[in-house]
Image (spheres, rainbow, N blue to C red):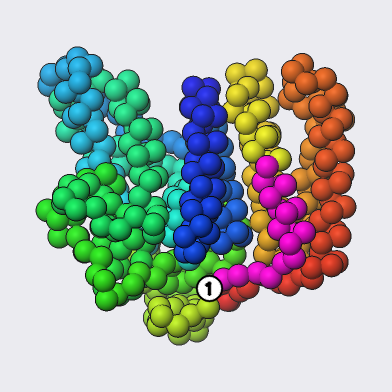
Amino acid sequence: MEQYGKILLIAMPAFLLLVLFEKWYGWYKNNDTVRNMDMISSLSSGITNATKDVLGLSITIIGYSWMVNHLAIVHVKSTLLCYVIAFFALDLTGYLVHRIDHEYNIFWNAHIIHHSSEEYNLACALRQSISSFIRLFTIFLLPAAILGVPALVIGIVAPLHLFAQFWYHTRHINKMGFLEKIIVTPSHHRVHHAINQEYLDKNYGQIFIFWDKWFGTFQEELPHIPAVYGITRPAQTWNPIKINFMHLFLLIKDAWYTKHWSDKIRIWFMPTGWRPTDVSEKFPVFKINDVYHFEKYDTKNSLFFNIWIWIQLVVLFLFVSFFFGNIAQIGSPGIFIYGVFIFIFVYAYTEQMDNSSYAWVWEVIKSSLGLVLIYLTGDWFGVNKFFPHMSQLIAIYLILSAFICFYFQKTEGTQNQPIINPY
């Protein structure tokens, strides 16, 4: 956890700068593909995912180390060839898991957040899941384990493989010649994120595109069919935590309300989007049928509100940076309390972004939790050791944040959350 946190201390600012550069470049070229609230929602999702990973909030059913120790027929050394084998093994595993996530109801919930943006840009690459607590598919690394590729090699290659998927989430790079036949390019991945019927459930590859060509899931980007992005049952919220669980909640409700016991069981393993006939008729859920004529989710807010939300995001980055850089010193259970604070922080200001009438409740919970922690310990997880009196400044921020939330709720207006899955 500690080492991964230090890696993220470098990766987070780099990703943020690239996201902001794309925003500037789009403005400069008069082709802005980054909406402000959508970008903040994406960045917030990245923070929740990183926090979950640093806290280690997932269980692997079959560990890779166990497979190497018990199933390897040879044991290769950590040579360059070993790293190449590991990279290809991870990429094939990524293709298979990605495809399963798309094709079965029970697994789509872990991936829906990544497709939830109705834009396509570098920021949306950071929309990663917090809803996957059990990792089932390490078994797909069995070939690497049989060859005896060390677990340490997989541990080094895996983050590199993940970070290498960031760059192609952009509309500013057109087709790339001969590279289109080898690697996943922005053109290939635009197809993957599109909800056009011609593009749905295509191009699952993560680094190499030939997996899709070999397994029959490849689709070229067509010049006469512009990609439309999002999910066919739109999220209608900027809150990434809500999006992470919206499909799961729908499955639970459908399983509860359907009258047929067989449907209560098979709904989880049916193709993504399948619903029992009786509940789909009684409780219809809005779905985009004409991808060229629908209104993207948006909220209307003042310039001052947008500036305030950016201030909230910057403050959150500071909280998270301190957390990732001091995991060992904070220790347990402190790191989990800190993690809860980060999640409530994100929930509170993204509810504000939605103009939710309940945003003030979450803001009060956030500020109260922070103030109680400072009162009980006289510090903020040891920050005063590095910056004297910083905990007092944090307390002042928490109080101001609550009052500013009340101010904007009064001046900007509120609305109840859109009903995504009405029951």
* Whole-percent x, y for residue 211 in the image: 17, 50
Front residue of 68/405: it is: 405
Residue 397 quadrant: top right
Residue 298 quadrant: bottom right
Residue 99 can be seen in this image = no
Q: Residue at x 23, y 30 (%)?
A: 86
Residue on which the image places disc 1: 296
Within the magenta stretch, is there residue 383? no
Within the magenta stretch, is there residue 313? yes
Magenta stretch, main secondary structure class: helix
* Whole-percent x, y for residue 39 in the image: 56, 55
Left or right of 51, for residue 101: left
Residue that sits furthest to the bottom in the current view? 281
* Whole-percent x, y for residue 334 in the image: 68, 27
Give the vertical position of 253 relative to 129 (above or below). Answer: below
Q: Residue at x 50, y 36 (%)?
A: 14
Left or right of 286, for residue 150: left
Residue 160 quadrant: top left
Q: Residue at x 12, y 53 (%)?
A: 214
Q: Residue at x 39, y 59 (%)?
A: 171
Provide the residue span drawn in magenta.
Answer: 296-314
Front residue of 73/348: it is: 348
Left or right of 207, for residue 391: right
* Whole-percent x, y for residue 212 in the image: 19, 54
The C terminus lies in which quarter of the figure? Answer: bottom right
Mark 1 residue element:
loop
| Amino acid identity at mark 1 | Lys
Q: Label 1: few (<14), some or many (≥20) within 10 Å?
A: few
Give the vertical position of 392 relative to 403 (above or below). Answer: above
Residue 409 can be seen in this image = yes
Q: How many marks?
A: 1
